[in-house]
């Protein structure tokens, strides 16, 4: 009979700099016989690239290939199949560590596996440094303090809704800016917030760029980009 | 003449479990000749307790004693004095690592030192695992995904404002619940969100407690407590 005692780990591996992994995730990664990670349809995996220095040789690797279609409903059939594959390892007594960019539960795809596997398998979620904290750190821009309200807004939100939410926040982060860059800038400028707005792409990675939003050329930004509207100063 | 080349570090040391510090913060902490950390007026310091296993003996320690008065304007004179003390070490060529619970720019006091010192001294902010990610992880509750809007709300917000912001969010985190517990619960219940609401205190610490909000006894909660309203499922 199978042991049924193996553990599923959702490992936050941080925003990009391999040194921003936690000691805990590092320890679990060093011991897990099976690792799994999201990748594009062609097999490129940012999560695996971030964790690469910490992955010992000879591990079983499961490449979770999913279509990157912004906003589209996740491919449930695809996740069903990967969850079954992972469950096979767990049932055979092998721990499985799923690598998650940033933090597992902050705009990640790990939740689709968690929903399917956590009810029947011991599961440990290891929080990680999110892109939000990373972007604020590299911009040198304190995000929130004391009684500030912070709103985290996805880039695809429509212009009026985005403007309304921004206007009602002390600070905001607009995620997944990508092709929405010009819209985001128009909204920020219309509210008179551009003096507090930073643009960050690939935070903590080698190709990181940090600019005041007003200095960013018009056009599209990469998917891994964020606009921060920092809190007003204390005057 | 003084060297003026030393670096001020704002080190995110994570939410409580000493193993949730990053490799980067761990490395910097091992090398810094001077460490500083916030403490209560009596000298108790959660930040130092979290980092304790990683602090080598024989370091110069600066205990930043500040009054814990919720909502009150920070004691600017106090921070001026500590900033001057830290600047003295930096000017003498000694790096200073400031320990920050969670993430330095996410509801932390490091910004008061950053504002005073970063303009004149090389400064590196190392992001950390925030209490937000930690609470979601220990509750096993995916926070946000895809096009969800997340609102982070301080507990002291008044009831009508809190209700309005909660009603307009896909997911929310209410920070610093403390003595506002009963108000927060009343708001969550009035909006019909209690089935998705978790209460977490001291996330990732030994005395951690995680409960569905509806099961939490009435009364006050500790300062380090949070209520999460998780995203609705995908159905």
Image: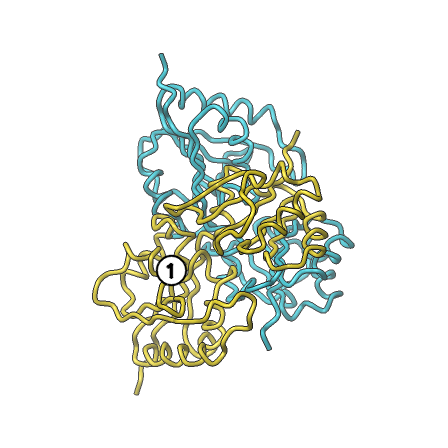
Chain colours: A yellow, B cyan
Q: Which residue is drawn at 35% across and 18% down?
A: B3
Percent position (x, y) of residue A31? 27, 63
Farthest residue to the right: give it. B160
Question: Disc 1 marks which residue?
Answer: A47
Task: Identify the residue at the far left of this view.
Answer: A58
Position of B164 with respect to A208 (left or right) is right
Question: What residue is drawn where x is 67% and y is 50%?
Answer: B155
Residue at 52%, 30% (x, y): give it: B113
Residue A56, position in %: x, y?
24, 61
Instruction: Answer above or below: position of B96 versus A29.
Output: above
Residue B1 seen in this snapshot = yes
Q: Locate the C terminus of chain A and report the quarter of the image it occupies.
A: top right
| Residue B115 vertical position relative to residue A218 in the rendered view, above or below | above
Is A132 positioned to the left or the right of A152 in the image?
A: left
Left or right, residue B120 beside residue B23: right
Q: How crowded is mark 1: few (under 14 residues within 10 Å), some or many (20 or more)?
A: many
Q: Which quadrant holds residue B164? A: bottom right
Q: Position of residue A8 (x, y in %)?
A: 38, 70
- Estimate the x, y position of residue B213 in percent, counting from the top left: 63, 65
Front-most of residues A29 and A99: A99
Q: Can residue B102 be seen in this view?
A: no
Residue nearest the viewer, comparing A144 with A169 = A169
Instruction: Determine whether B67 is above or below A203 in the image.
Output: above
Taking the spot 52% from the left edge, 36% from the top edge, the residue there is B110
Q: Nearer the viewer, residue B211 or A137?
A: A137
| Chain for disc number 1 | A
């Amino acid at each position: 009979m199978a042991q049924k005692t193996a553990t599923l780990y959702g490992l936050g591996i941080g925003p990009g700099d391999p040194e921003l992994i936690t000691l805990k995730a590092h320890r679990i990664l060093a011991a897990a016989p099976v690792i799994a990670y999201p990748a594009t349809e062609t097999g490129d995996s940012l999560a695996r690239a971030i964790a690469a220095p910490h992955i010992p040789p000879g591990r079983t690797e499961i490449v979770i290939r999913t279509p990157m279609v912004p906003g589209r409903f996740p491919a449930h059939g695809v996740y069903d199949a990967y969850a079954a594959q992972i469950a096979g390892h767990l049932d055979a007594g092998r721990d499985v560590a799923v690598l998650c960019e940033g933090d597992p539960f902050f705009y990640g795809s790990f939740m689709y596996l968690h929903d399917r596997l956590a009810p029947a398998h011991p599961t440990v979620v290891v929080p990680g440094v999110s892109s939000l904290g990373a972007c604020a750190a590299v911009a040198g821009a304190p995000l929130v303090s004391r009684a500030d309200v912070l709103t985290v807004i996805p880039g695809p939100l429509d212009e009026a809704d985005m403007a309304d939410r921004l206007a009602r926040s002390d600070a905001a982060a607009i995620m997944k800016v990508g092709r929405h860059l010009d819209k985001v800038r128009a909204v920020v400028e219309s509210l008179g917030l551009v003096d507090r707005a930073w643009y960050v792409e690939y935070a903590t990675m080698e190709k990181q760029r940090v600019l005041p939003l007003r200095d960013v050329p018009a056009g599209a930004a990469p998917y891994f980009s964020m606009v921060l509207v920092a809190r007003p100063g204390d005057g």
